[in-house]
Image (tube, grey):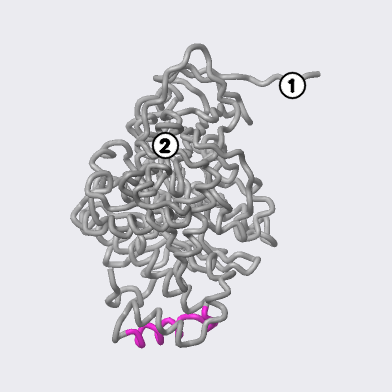
Amino acid sequence: MATTTQTVLVKTTAGVVRGAKEQGIAVFRGVPYAAAPVGDLRFSPPQPAPAWEGVRDATKDGPVAPQGRSRLAHIMGDFERPQSEDCLTLTIWTPAPDAAKRPVLVWIHGGAFSSGAGSLPWYCGEQFATNGDMVVVSMNYRLGALGFLCLPGASQGNLGLLDQLAALNFVRANIAAFGGDPENVTVAGQSAGAAAIVILMTMPGARGLFRRAILQSTPFGRMARTLDDAHRIGRRLLEVLSLEPAQAIRLKSLPVAELVRAQGEVARLEKKFADTFAPFWPVIDGSVYPGEVAPALKAGAGAEIETMIGTTREEMAAFYCIDEQVAGADPAAVEAVFAAMFKSHWRHYYDEIRRTRAANSNAALLGELMTQASFRMGSLRMAEWRADQGHPAYVYQFDWQSPAGFESCHCLEIPFVFNNLASWTGSPMLKGADPDETRGLAAAMHGAWIAFARSGTPDHPRLPVWPPYRRADRMTMRFDRVIGPVSDLAGIEWRRPWPG
């Protein structure tokens, strides 16, 4: 007997889309939130999605943004999906497209603004929709040079950020038709996705589009490029393609595969010792991206947005575990990284980190330094500012260790947040994990993310009480084999004078 699929129709501002019921949840895939940025629209800000007649099929994923292989495939796993510049689409999960006005969770994926896709099974929102009675939206946006090249004569830059803004405006205008409440939107993201959210919190055009923010492993230590540096990167792309600056306009018609290959070569040429900064990145342009994020947050930008923020304990283990330059460096090279950051006072910080790490390998020493500088420092500073502004954040640290030897690395918390461990079967970072332990940790974290998105507080019956972060006690929820709040988990080390 043939299997029948129950289809569901929703009318959006551009036309009717047809989704399908999957495990009792209505799912809409490949829903366009902007026009395809192809042809003359390459390197242009996102334009409104053209209206269509009849019913548009939304039962299959659309293509992902053009990209090379993820530099974190060795820990997360690999994926192959059809790629196309016609990628500005959403995946939407809802218990029912009715008038219930459910909380909405919008996910912005990470990947150094150069890889990934919101439509990957890793970010399946089915469990959130089922367990939280909420509407979940995950977006694709332009990546790499197509999304973040900033070069006169070719691209203004920050197009990926504008894509995200367009997606949020689509949610604002349409999510009620999918059963969601446009006044109760939480935006969550990891790594580059979290960086994008923090930038959006300072962008006037994003004001009022979301009520809460969940920031996972925000790279505060590398939030932007300057215009001059972005232009330099753009000129290097031209050099790789054997083009002169006056020929920048030719990038608009270059075959996309050639552009992706060239941006990969630029990344190789730009790589520096112990540095993971990707070449194509958001740029402070004074208009789309108004200015430095940290001073804006300290001055109160986005203070009305309820915030959950945290990091993994060893973020950089994901990158340094396969970095042969780091593994083979002599002591002088490692010490030089500390000296470049702390100048004449570097020895104190070097010795302090040596005392805090049981292993004194290059990866451990540099990993602790750059985890602090790139991720933890900025996250805790933001939490302090929010407390000072009378809007205390909820802070977490993910300490659970990968059984496969990747420590508590970048990205390791994501399967637990989404509570979709089956979607991560074969992921190297989870190899050998105890199923009972992972299920319990996932229940605790997933429930906290649901509770926060619904009410602004993360407490739920499967989790110890999670106090907000205040200067007096700096309470931080530790997610590990034992789960619970810890006072001042980061310790005194991070409160010594650090750059930035």
- Tell me the quadrant of the picture where the C terminus can be found: bottom left
- Looking at the image, is 187 positioned above or below residue 380? above
Query: In this orientation, which residue lies closer to the viewer: 227 or 318?
Result: 227
Q: Please say whether residue 354 is one of the residues in the magenta stretch.
A: yes
- Read off the residue under disc 2: 42
Q: Quadrant of residue 432?
A: bottom right
Left or right: 434, with 488 as reference point: right
Q: Assess disc 2: are there few (<14), some (14-19) or many (≥20) residues with their C-alpha within 10 Å of its C-alpha.
A: many
**Which residue type carries mark 2?**
Arg
Q: Is residue 465 among the parts visible in the rendering?
A: no
Query: In this orientation, which residue lies closer to the viewer: 246 or 31?
Result: 246
The residue at the point 46 percent across, 38 percent down is 253
**Secondary-structure class at tag 1:** loop
Mark 2 or mark 1, earlier in chain: 1
Q: Single out the mark in the foreground, 2 or 1.
A: 2
Counting from the top left corner in percent of width and height, residue 256 is at 52, 42
Label annotation for residue 254: none
**Secondary-structure class at tag 2:** loop
**Which residue type carries mark 1?**
Thr
Q: Is residue 301 among the parts visible in the rendering?
A: yes
Q: Please say whether residue 295 is one of the residues in the magenta stretch.
A: no
Counting from the top left corner in percent of width and height, residue 204 is at 23, 41
Gap between marks 2 and 1, in whole Å? 41 Å
Q: What stretch is highlighted in magenta?
A: 346-362
Left or right: 296, with 31 as reference point: left
Q: Main secondary structure of the magenta part?
A: helix
The residue at the point 63 percent across, 54 percent down is 77
The residue at the point 42 percent across, 49 percent down is 193
Q: In which quarter of the image is residue 250?
A: top left
Counting from the top left corner in percent of width and height, residue 264 is at 52, 56
- Read off the residue under disc 1: 3
Query: In this orientation, which residue lies closer to the viewer: 8 or 307?
Result: 8
